[in-house]
Amino acid sequence: MIISIASGKGGTGKTTVAVNLALSLLKESTQLIDCDVEEPNSHLFLKPNIHQVTSVGISVPRIDESKCTYCGKCAQVCEYHAIAVILKNVLVFDELCHGCGACSYLCPEKAISEVERGIGIVQEGSSNGIPFVNGVLNVGEPMASPLIRKVKERIWKDKIVILDAPPGTACPVIETVKGSDFCILVTEPTPFGLNDLELAVGMLEKLGIPRGVVVNKVDVGNREVWDYCQSKNIPVLMEIPMDREIAESYSKGIPIVFENPCYAPLFLSLFQKVEKLYGECRRK
Amino acid sequence: MKIAISATGKDLDSQIDPRFGRCQYFIFVDPQTMEFEVSENEGLMASGGAGVQAAQLVVRKGANVLITGNLGPNAASALSASGIKVHLVSGGTVKEVVEAYKSGTLKVVSGPTVPPHFGKPF
């Protein structure tokens, strides 16, 4: 079962929920994967031992100008304008290339070969007996999605897989949550939290992924998040208080279930609700 | 002779658009007759590669000269491969910058003037 933890707004508590949920379940049946490759942070709390590091690259085109007739088919087919054919020049813009391979496939002269361009690494290890995976994108690198795909290849399907997603609703988030059996949206009860929650719900509706909400920092803001969830028939699965103890343990990099074990049953109950809702969705 | 100008509107009285890859329209003007043709900039809302796309349009339309406000790095390399002369202006209408070009007062630029994604509207 794959559970992704996402949110429209950043800083609402995705990693807090992902890490503490993983630590509250049976070690041998859980896997935690940090898919926020642009700014991974689950490792700060889990402090995993990394035993394997793999480089990830995407294939970018190289032109053999002795074969090229400057017909321009490669530039026409490139959705991202990563190739331009201008007079007798073929220009390749590596950082715009998504590595789809259409240019080399369609080149009538077979003048295009592909070389690997490194975009980041995948790290595999374990923490407290829980298998752990994350991806780290090279600084300044715009192509997050191909690395997220590689990170997700490490999913162990027979486990309860918890995916810590990047914030927002753009390509890296969609790449992370697609294929999930359930998505937990973490929000805070503020106008910003609500606005971005609505965007995230819209994204999940389009992807057809069952969803529920965790409201974090419940003592701030107003009740509009609950009103919205009620109107959309989205279950509020857990409420986390605005508690100084949580903030302090977070700032020290200690998961709250270690600092205060009273939280562990609450996260376990969150999982049981998700499991039940997922079961109901499957029966439908 | 054909001059490409990034513009905010569709006629010679429109203000120039200081963005190249993210301009609203391109106006292609014959400076002798002042006849012109307008193209919408399809790259305006592209997620990336707008400068490369715009440079290819300008080349395809057969322009010899480009007048715009700024150039990003990819657009600058693409235009430099094309041999099109690029002139920068800070403002004015299309008509005014064509007159300025004819009087020879516009400066020529060969490299980028702004970083990537500079004109991106989102």
Image: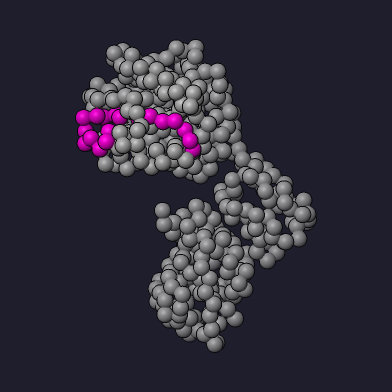
Q: Is residue A280 above or below residue B2?
A: above
> Which residue occupies 38% across, 32% down?
A185
Q: Which residues are magenta?
A: A207-227
Q: Is residue A145 above or below residue A66?
A: above
| Closer to the camera in the image, A223 or B79 | A223
| Closer to the camera in the image, B54 or A51 | B54
Residue A64 visible (yes or no): no
Tell whether A233 sits left or right of A51.
left
Q: Position of residue B70 (x, y in %)?
A: 46, 65
> Which residue occupies 46% across, 12% down?
A27
> Which residue occupies 23% across, 35% down?
A223
Q: Position of residue A121 (x, y in %)?
A: 55, 32
Residue extending farthest to the front is A284
Q: Position of residue B6 (x, y in %)?
A: 48, 70
Tell whether A114 sits left or right of B95.
right
Residue A210 part of the magenta segment:
yes
Q: Is residue A130 above or below residue A146?
A: above
Figure quadrant of residue B61: bottom right
Label total for image:
0
Residue extending farthest to the bottom is B33
Identify the coloring: one colour
Q: Position of residue A58 (x, y in %)?
A: 61, 40
Residue A27 visible (yes or no): yes
> Which residue occupies 21% across, 33% down?
A220
Residue A253 part of the magenta segment:
no
